[in-house]
Image (cartoon, helix red, strand yellow):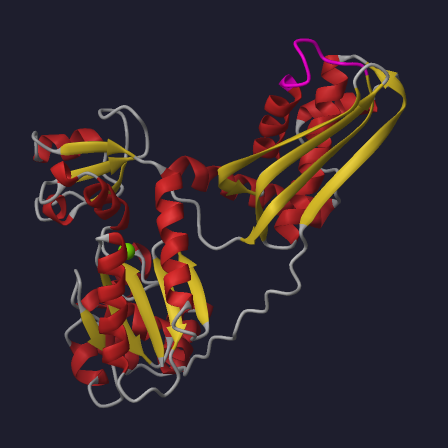
Amino acid sequence: MILHVDMDAFFASIEQAINPRLKGKPLIVGSRQSRFHTVVCAASYEAKRLGIGSGMSSQEAFSLCPGLEFVPADQSKYIWTSEEIFKLLQDYGFPLNYASIDEFQLDIGDVPEPQKIALDIQQAIQRNFNITASIGIAKNWLLSKLASKLNKPNGIAMITDDNLETVLAAVPVRKLCGVGASTEVVLQCLGIKTCLDLYRQSGQFLHEHLGQHGLDFYASLRATDKIELQDQAEKPKSVGHSYTFPRASQNTGFIHAWIRLLSEMVALRLREKNLVARTVHLWLNGPQIGNFSAQKTYAESTDDGQIIYQKTLKILARSGPKTPKIRAMGVTCSGLVEQAYQPLFLEQKRREALVKSLDQINTRFGEDTIYPAVITLTRKLI
Ligand SMILES: [Mg+2]
């Protein structure tokens, strides 16, 4: 059995847990500092009841509730809490998946009383973090995720072979993960309104109308999922690239271009290994500075060359007020963890989609098809 833990209004609940003044109040967490020019990335249950939800502009939210509380998002707080919850769940000893920043899946096998474990997890999370979680239990991830939504907030629901049809008949099909607005329209046209309507269709019928997506629904609803125990051994400790110039240079543009290129190469290696890094390390060697090396660890991890580059530039600034004369340099990332969840905010989602597209183009048409313009400066002869 898969046990799906889904935190209730995660970011908003964390803010309320930290600041008791916000408890019980309608609250939104915005993706930017400015309360009037931002997008709601989380709403407390008190705000949800007023019709406020994620993705809405903050102006719209304030027009629905002028007394709304506003907090700008603080990613590092949410990531920290998420990782602590993950550790707490690890102690249960079941194979565990990080599904997203606020969703976790445990494979509890055939334990006799799954609800007891669910209740225990809920209570442990409440005790340690003062926030609530909803838990769904079923034979696969899709049904367990659906079950976690049925009694929100702070609910537990279990879908078994015995109650499967009764439960699915009561749930509109759009609640199923993977049914977006356009899929919903297709399903409505076919007369498929509830999850049970969808469940009753044959694989062939779903394939005809929804293609591969339809077949995936068919298979995922019926699957019995297993989560493998994570193998921690194979992860590299760091990823780095270095370069030695034919002779020392003090040309800032040229040096920056090389740092950018090395950052991009490191980032690509990270993405290939599905890793993200927290610590960025820069090493420089030159006739005046000798060996200079410094590193910095950040709360947010990354696999984006541009971000690694910006971080190395800040480290470079520590070497002195002027760009030093440099003969060799290296960019290394460490503090590596597996990429566990999707980017949290719209701007990051856009950036990640862009990087992914660039990778696809470069894989398909050759490595040097598209790259940051500044990198052309590395071809300059010195
Ligand atoms: Mg959630």
Quadrant, the C terminus: top right
* Pick the front one: 378 or 197: 378
Residue drawn at x 23%, y 79% as measured from the top left: 115
Question: Does 322 lie within the magenta span?
Answer: yes
Q: Quadrant of the rendered structure where residue 33 is?
A: top left
User: Considering only vertical position in the picture, is 346 above or below 194?
Assistant: above
Residue 127 appears at what percent x and percent y?
23, 59
Residue 257 appears at what percent x and percent y?
72, 23
Residue drawn at x 25%, y 68% as measured from the top left: 135
Quadrant, the N terminus: bottom left
Give the residues in magenta. Answer: 317-325
Mark yes or no: residue 370 visible. Answer: no
User: Considering only vertical position in the picture, is 50 above or below 175?
Assistant: above
User: Considering only vertical position in the picture, is 319 above or below 74?
Assistant: above
Residue drawn at x 34%, y 36% as measured from the top left: 74
Residue 242 appears at what percent x and percent y?
79, 35
Residue 227 horizontal side relative to residue 332, left or right: left
Question: Does 193 lie within the magenta span?
Answer: no
Residue 265 horizontal side relative to residue 82, left or right: right
